[in-house]
Image: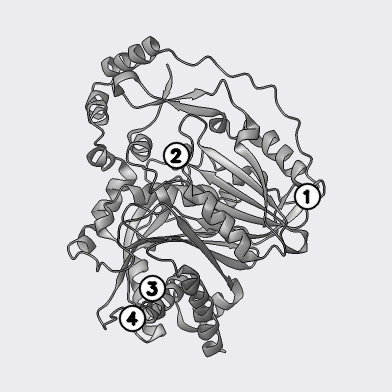
C-alpha cells in the first residue's frame, strides 16, 4: 500500500495558488564556515536520511479518486534543491532580506520534493545564511521535521556522517494507484466521502473535520460572532513579498514581565500590539478606543490520546487591543485573553518542547501555518506564531548560528504574517508581507524594536 496524504495535507495543495504560496521559510545566519558553502551543501546531503520525506514527491491519483500519495522521486537531484547564491557588497541585512523576499515569493515545483535550501555568501564579516523553504504538507507532526532542524548541533565538532546509498523505490503506476484507492474504500468506506470532495476540488469543509483545526474552530466560536475589522491587512494578495526582521533581548522582555506580570509571550503580543497601533496611525488609519486587530495564535498542545506533547497545534483567536493607548492596560488585557489558553490543561510548556525536540522552531512554525490554514481568513486579520528555541548556541558545519528568523506564509486575502522565535538570549521576529498592500513592513519592524526599548526603559 502506498502512503496517502491526509485530507488536510491535500487541502494545502488544492487551495494553494501562485499568488499565495504556502511554504514556510526560515533564515539562519551563521558565522564564517570553514569550508565555505561546500561544507554546508555536504551537510544538507548527509542529513537527508533523517528526513526521508525530503526525497519523496507527490503523485496524483487518476481522476482524483483519492488523495495523492507520497512516492520516492526516481529523479531526485540534491543539487536542484540545494542552491547557492550571494549578495553584493557590502552584504547588508537589507540586501539579504531582499533576496529572501524574492525567494519566498516563488512557489515550489509540484513535480519535485517540496523543499529548497539556499546557501548565501557575501554577507558582512564573512557570515553566511541558510534560507529554507518547506511546504507544510511535508511537516505533518514532530515525526516529520523541517530540514533546518536536523542541520543544527549543540557542539561545533560533531562529525558529518557519510552520505547514504539511497535507492528510490519504483513509482506506483496508474493502475496501482486506482486499485489502492478502491482497496482503501473497501477497508475504510468513510474515505470515499473525503475522496469525493477531493475530486471536485472542494476541501474546505473536509479540513474542518481534522481534530486540531476543528478544536480551534470550537474555541474560536465566541470570537467569531463579531467579525474582525478589515483594513490594510486584509486585501487581495499579490505575487510578491517583502520580508522585514526585528530583534529583542530576552532579558529585557523578562524584566517587563517581572514588573507587570503575564508571560514573555504576553509581553511579545503587547509589543506587537503597540507597534501595530503606531503603524496604523503612521498610515493615517482610524484608530479608535475600540479598535482591535484579531490575531490567530497557534499553540502547541497535547491531546488526551497523544503520547508526544506538542505534536498537535491548535488555533486560538486573540484580539490585539490597538485602540488602547496605555501599554500596561494592553498587557493586562492580553494576559487575561491568553490565560484561558494556558489554563486549558492542554498547552505545552516552552521548556518541555525544547527538551523533547531540540531546535523545534522550523517544525512548529510549519505546524502553526497548518492550523491557520484550516480557519476561514474572514475570522482573523493576521497570523502570529511564537515558538521557543534553545537558549544555548547551536552550530551547523562547525559554525555558530548567530540569528534565526521565521517567515510564515500569507493566507489568501491577508497581507501580513508574523513569526517569532527565541534563541540564545534573544527573540527574533520575522514579518512576511504582501509587497503591494504592506510595502512599508520595514517601518513596522522598526516600531517593534522601538516598543521594546520604550517598555524596557519605563520599567528601569
**Residue hosting label 4:** 284
**Residue hosting label 1:** 398
Is residue 145 visible from the viewing direction of this image?
yes
In whole angstroms, how far apart are the C-alphas of marks 2 and 1?
30 Å
The one nearer the camera, 219 or 140, is: 140
The location of residue 290, given as percent across then percent down, is: 24, 79
- Check residue 140 in the rendering and tell me which mark sits there, or answer none: 2
In whole angstroms, how far apart are the C-alphas of marks 2 and 4?
41 Å
The location of residue 350, given as percent across then percent down, is: 52, 59
Say if 373 sits above or below 330 in the image.
Answer: above
Q: Which secondary structure lies at badge 3?
A: helix
Identify the mark nearer the N-term, 2 or 1: 2
- Check residue 115 in the rendering and tell me which mark sits there, or answer none: none
Identify the mark nearer the N-term, 1 or 3: 3
Is residue 301 visible from the viewing direction of this image?
no
Identify the mark nearer the N-term, 3 or 4: 4
Q: Nearer the viewer, mark 4 or mark 1?
A: 4
Circle 3/circle 4 CB separation < 8 Å: no
Report the residue at 32% width, 76% height from top. Answer: 321
The location of residue 200, given as percent across then percent down, is: 23, 30
The one nearer the camera, 334 or 379, is: 379
Amino acid at each position: 500500500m502506498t502512503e496517502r496524504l491526509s485530507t488536510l495535507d491535500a487541502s494545502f495543495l488544492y487551495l494553494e495558488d501562485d499568488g499565495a504560496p504556502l511554504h514556510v521559510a526560515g533564515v539562519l545566519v551563521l558565522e564564517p564556515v570553514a569550508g565555505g558553502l561546500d561544507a554546508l551543501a555536504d551537510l544538507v546531503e548527509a542529513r537527508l536520511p533523517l528526513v526521508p520525506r525530503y526525497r519523496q514527491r507527490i503523485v496524483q491519483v487518476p481522476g482524483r479518486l483519492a488523495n495523492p500519495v507520497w512516492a520516492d522521486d526516481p529523479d531526485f537531484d540534491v543539487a536542484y534543491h540545494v542552491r547557492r547564491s550571494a549578495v553584493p557588497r557590502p552584504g547588508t541585512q537589507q540586501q539579504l532580506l531582499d533576496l529572501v523576499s524574492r525567494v519566498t515569493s516563488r512557489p515550489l515545483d509540484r513535480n519535485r520534493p517540496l523543499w529548497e535550501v539556499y546557501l548565501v555568501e557575501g554577507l558582512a564579516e564573512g557570515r553566511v545564511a541558510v534560507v529554507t523553504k518547506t511546504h507544510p504538507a511535508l511537516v505533518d507532526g514532530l515525526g516529520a521535521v523541517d530540514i533546518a532542524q536536523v542541520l543544527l548541533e549543540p557542539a561545533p565538532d560533531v562529525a558529518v556522517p557519510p552520505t547514504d546509498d539511497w535507492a528510490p523505490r519504483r513509482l506506483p503506476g496508474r493502475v496501482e494507484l486506482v486499485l489502492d484507492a478502491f482497496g482503501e474504500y473497501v477497508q475504510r468506506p468513510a474515505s470515499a466521502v473525503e475522496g469525493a470532495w477531493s475530486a471536485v476540488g472542494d476541501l474546505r469543509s473536509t479540513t474542518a473535520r481534522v481534530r486540531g483545526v476543528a478544536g480551534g474552530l470550537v474555541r474560536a466560536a465566541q470570537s467569531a460572532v463579531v467579525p474582525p475589522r478589515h483594513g490594510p491587512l486584509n486585501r487581495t494578495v499579490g505575487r510578491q513579498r517583502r520580508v522585514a526582521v526585528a530583534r529583542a533581548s530576552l532579558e529585557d522582555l523578562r524584566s517587563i514581565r517581572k514588573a507587570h506580570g503575564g508571560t514573555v509571550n504576553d509581553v511579545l503580543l503587547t509589543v506587537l500590539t503597540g507597534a501595530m497601533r503606531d503603524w496604523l496611525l503612521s498610515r493615517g488609519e482610524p484608530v479608535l478606543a475600540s479598535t482591535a486587530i484579531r490575531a490567530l495564535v497557534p499553540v502547541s498542545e497535547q491531546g488526551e490520546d497523544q503520547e508526544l506533547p506538542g505534536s498537535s497545534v491548535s488555533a486560538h483567536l486573540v484580539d490585539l487591543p490597538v485602540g488602547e493607548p496605555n501599554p500596561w492596560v494592553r498587557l493586562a488585557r492580553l494576559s487575561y485573553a491568553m490565560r484561558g489558553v494556558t489554563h486549558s490543561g492542554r498547552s505545552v510548556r516552552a521548556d518541555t518542547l525544547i527538551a523533547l525536540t531540540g531546535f523545534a522552531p522550523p517544525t512548529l512554525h510549519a505546524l502553526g501555518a497548518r492550523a491557520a490554514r484550516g480557519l476561514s481568513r474572514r475570522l482573523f486579520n493576521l497570523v502570529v506564531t511564537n515558538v521557543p528555541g534553545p537558549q544555548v548556541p547551536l552550530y551547523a558545519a562547525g559554525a555558530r548560528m548567530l540569528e534565526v528568523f521565521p517567515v510564515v506564509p500569507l493566507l489568501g486575502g491577508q497581507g501580513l504574517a508574523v513569526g517569532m522565535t527565541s534563541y540564545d538570549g534573544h527573540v527574533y521576529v520575522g514579518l512576511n508581507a504582501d509587497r503591494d498592500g504592506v510595502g512599508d513592513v520595514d517601518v513596522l519592524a522598526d516600531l517593534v524594536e522601538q516598543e521594546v526599548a520604550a517598555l524596557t526603559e519605563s520599567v528601569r
